[in-house]
Amino acid sequence: MKKRLKTTAASLLVLSLTAGGAGSAFALEGQPAPAPGHAAITAVTEASSSQQHYREYISILASGNLARAVNYLNNHLSKVDSWTASMMALRLENAQNAALGKLQQRYEQSGVQKAIDDAWRAGGSGTYTSLLKHAKGESVRKLLADSRDQGYAVATAEGMFFPVINYPLYENWKSRVTADIQLYVKLMADEVRKPTLRDAGLVIGWGELLQRDLDAEKFLLQYRSSNRYKAVSERYEQLKTHLFYGSNNTPLFDYDTKKIDAEALAAYKKAVADAASSSSFTPLLMKVKNFLTVVERNDGNYTDDVKKWLSVQAPTGA
């Protein structure tokens, strides 16, 4: 087994936050999946309140004022229908992704990284309340305030600090958007609250890793027409790689002993047993079940037999 996997903490974060493109079923960019039995919405009634709010919102986004756009959603999303609300939320995500590179450059300016590190250490937290309380320097404080107001969170990996979309903020709007976008936001918010990886090591437990991949699988099975199907599909594949291989600093099979991680083995066995007792096997759980059969046949060791199974059933592309 190679000691280096292509997916790093940084690449996972970037890929997992990349929005998927719209399929042919969507006449408007950012439109959520149509409900079962319903066609995609191509227009909202001209005189409707939803259309008026949508147009006002789009003009704000076009101006590049993300802080104002976030504030508009907070104050007006309850006044539009769920389809329009979903489109508005996804349009914000598109705009945030587009602006992310420019904001990142501000984090890379001289002295900013050290100032954020000092503030994080002083407050023991990466929340804006703590960072703004302890940050020194007006330019750094403005950067943090801008990031907050524009709907970003501050993340850290490999000793660096950088902005990511603050998906937990989107959960404030979950009662207004369609079911597929509700689940999409949950997937992304979980990653922001507790990243899967940090410094090439797994931050979450093996059981939680499996559950996150099962959540992504649920989305893919239920919302094949969703505008965010591609983004979730990419996330699913990334998580699946970690599920069957681990990460560079948290391998599933020990580099020296070749033994499978005991906690991972226990977590996978429990998930399979739970699925068996409730007759709720999904394609991913069936794959885990088959994997465990091969692993147990080899006494928990990474052998050529296990390697061959993985290369066919869970290839990494490495």
Image: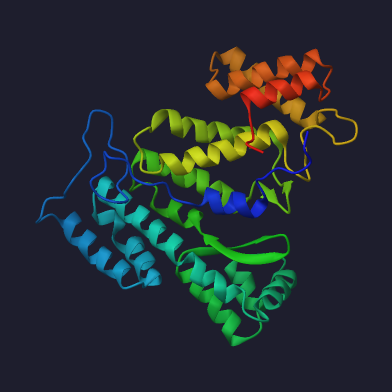
* Residue 189 position (above or below residue 120): above
Residue 269 visible in the picture: no
> Looking at this view, is 204 or 75 the one in front?
204
- What residue is drawn where x is 48% and y is 30%? 218
Q: Nearer the viewer, residue 8 or 35?
A: 8
Task: Please give the name of the residue rendered at 36% of the width and 73% of the height, measured from the top-left corner.
Answer: 65
Is 300 on the left-hand or right-hand side of 292? right
Between 141 and 292, the residue placed more toward the observer is: 292
Classify the position of the N terminus by image quarter: top right
Q: Count of labels shown?
A: 0
x, y percent for residue 174: 39, 48
Compared across the picture, whether 231 is left or right of 144 comes to: left
Tell me which corner region of the image, top left, top right, bottom left or bottom right, holds residue 205. top right
Q: Could you say where residue 251 lies in the image, as x and y percent from the top left?
A: 78, 38
- Residue sitting at the far left: 47
Visible residue check, residue 95: yes
Is 220 drawn above or below residue 171 in the view shown? above
The answer to whether residue 98 is above or below residue 233 is: below
Q: Which residue appears farthest toward the front when viewing the image?
A: 318
Residue at 51 percent of width and 52 percent of height: 17
Which quarter of the rendered picture does the C terminus lie within?
top right
Q: In the rendered view, would you say 41 is above or below 29?
A: above
* Left or right of 308 on screen, residue 258: right
Residue occupying image coordinates x 34% and y 46%: 177
Could you say where residue 308 lies in the image, as x and y percent from the top left?
72, 21
Q: Locate residue 137, reporting x and y percent.
A: 63, 86
Q: Residue furthest right?
A: 257
